[in-house]
Image (cartoon, helix red, strand yellow):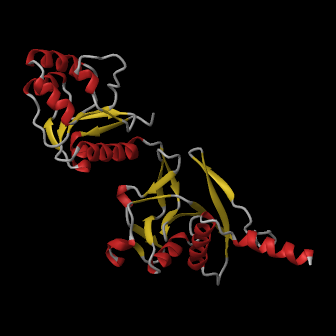
Amino acid sequence: MGQSVTISNKDFAAAIELEIAVPGRGSFTVDTSDVYRPGMQCTGYFHHFANKRVQLFGNAEINYLAEIPEATARERMETYFAYDLPAVCVSRSHKLLPFMEEAAKKNGVPVFRSSLATTRLSHRIVSYLDERTSPCITRHGGLIDINGVGIMLMGESGIGKSETALELVKRGHRLVADDVIEIRKTSDGGLSGSAPDLVRYLMELRGIGIVDVRSLYGVGSVLHNKKIDLVVEMEDWEAEKEYDRLGVAYDTISILGVALPSILLPVRPGRNLAIIVEVAAMNFRLKRMGYDAAVEFDRRLLEQLKK
């Protein structure tokens, strides 16, 4: 179960490209991204009925109801729509059978239609609801897609996160969020980040103000959301502090119960932070592919010691 959210008919229809066939109550509430196909309910079996999920009628359900005696089908649909259903979707541009439309209106259940095949429509609904119902928190920081690796930049205000992100955009990488990140837990146990609608693709640069990255650098410079793979925490350089110089293992930071690998990046004048972050992303990608430079160095060192 995810968090409970109320979705308006208008938002749901716009996001998945649906036609509103029956407005019903105008909105619906769900707490899961799962979709349910009510084939058994069409046959009159209502035990173990997942009525709290968005319902999806495809070819099989509609054609079955059209082929059985109308009185029987009507009775079953009256029972079906009397349950507390969030919303009903119909695929392949099927027209609602008259008794279905009547029962939906009577019980205030929103009904939507789509020209998509049932499987494709199901995938779209699940994807949309997964994003809406996933646990979500807000964090201060930036999120950049660097060659497919989602890098979350963290650090105190004024440390240089936005300037680093802008330099990475200039180097051909894509901005997801600056200053504020909405982080959601995904169905595969990972974390996905995006920017709030109010500040999406906008960046604050001290001395200049607010700039629109998409307008300045084009649509290829931004991304709506991205899986978070690595956290880079920036802090002011402390001369007496020991920093990791080998990178044999990552530290971790926990967000929404998910442990993310992280590195601590000391900041001082003269360091090209954008290049360092870019190298961190590429090195992380190499490690995922099975090559670790620190492990290789350790192997060479042990060989030398043996000699």
Quarter of the image where one finds residue 63: top left
Residue 211 seen in the current view:
no
Residue 181 seen in the current view:
yes
Q: Is residue 67 above or below residue 289?
A: above
Percent x, y of residue 77: 18, 21
Q: Looking at the image, which residue is at 91% across and 75% down?
A: 305
Q: Quadrant of the N terminus?
A: top left
Residue reaching furthest to the bottom: 270
Percent x, y of residue 115: 16, 47
Percent x, y of residue 37: 29, 31
Count the marks.
Answer: 0
Quarter of the image where one finds residue 245: bottom right
Residue closest to the eye, 94 or 79: 94
Q: Is residue 251 above or below residue 14?
A: below
Q: Looking at the image, which residue is at 34% across and 22% down?
A: 49
Q: Looking at the image, which residue is at 33% across and 75% down?
A: 218
Q: Is residue 5 left or right of residue 171?
A: left
Q: Is residue 148 left or right of residue 125?
A: right
Q: Is residue 124 above or below residue 226?
A: above
Percent x, y of residue 33: 38, 39
Residue closest to the eye, 84 or 298: 298
Residue closest to the eye, 110 or 291: 291
Q: Quadrant of the C terminus?
A: bottom right
